[in-house]
Amino acid sequence: MHGKGEIMHLGIRRPWRRRGLGMALLQHSLQTFYRHGIGTIRLNVDVQSLTNAQQLYQRAGFACVDSFRNYHKSL
């Protein structure tokens, strides 16, 4: 396995949360990466996520390697 992949966005609409759909989508994505020979996957998650999305990724075997903040300002 070589190559790197990235999951840019994974979201479940509020009425459909807590039904295993996030994990199912994540597992499907990981299987697709694997079939294409991609062995390292990266994703970003908001550390202050109100949905605790980081728990989903940890349950799927992801490990936090760093944290950072993004700043913005509207003019």
Image (cartoon, rainbow, N blue to C red):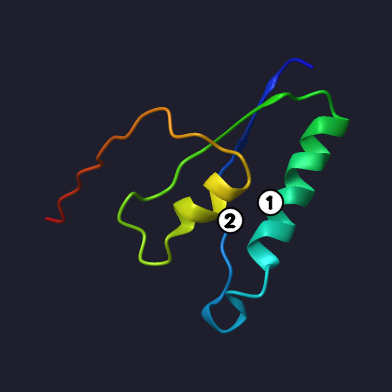
Closer to the N terminus: mark 1 or mark 2?
2
> Mark 2 falls on what kind of element?
loop
Q: Left or right? Give the position of 46 relative to 43.
A: left
The residue at which mark 1 appears reads as: 26
- Quadrant position of the N terminus in the picture: top right
Q: Could you say which is closer to the camera, residue 19 or residue 2?
A: 19
> Residue 41 occupies which quadrant of the picture?
top right
Amino acid type shown at disc 2 = Leu
Q: Which quadrant holds residue 40?
A: top right
Q: Which mark, by number, is residue 51?
A: none
Q: How many marks?
A: 2
Which residue type carries mark 1?
Answer: Leu
* Residue at point 20%, 48% (across, down): 72
Label 1, label 2: how far apart the Cα atoms are: 8 Å
Nearer to us: label 1 or label 2: 1
Q: Are marks 1 and 2 in contact (CB under 8 Å)?
A: yes
Give the image location of residue 33, x and y in percent.
77, 34
* Residue designated by label 2: 10
Query: What percent of the width, then of the height, locates residue 29?
Result: 74, 46
Q: Is residue 26 above or below residue 44?
A: below
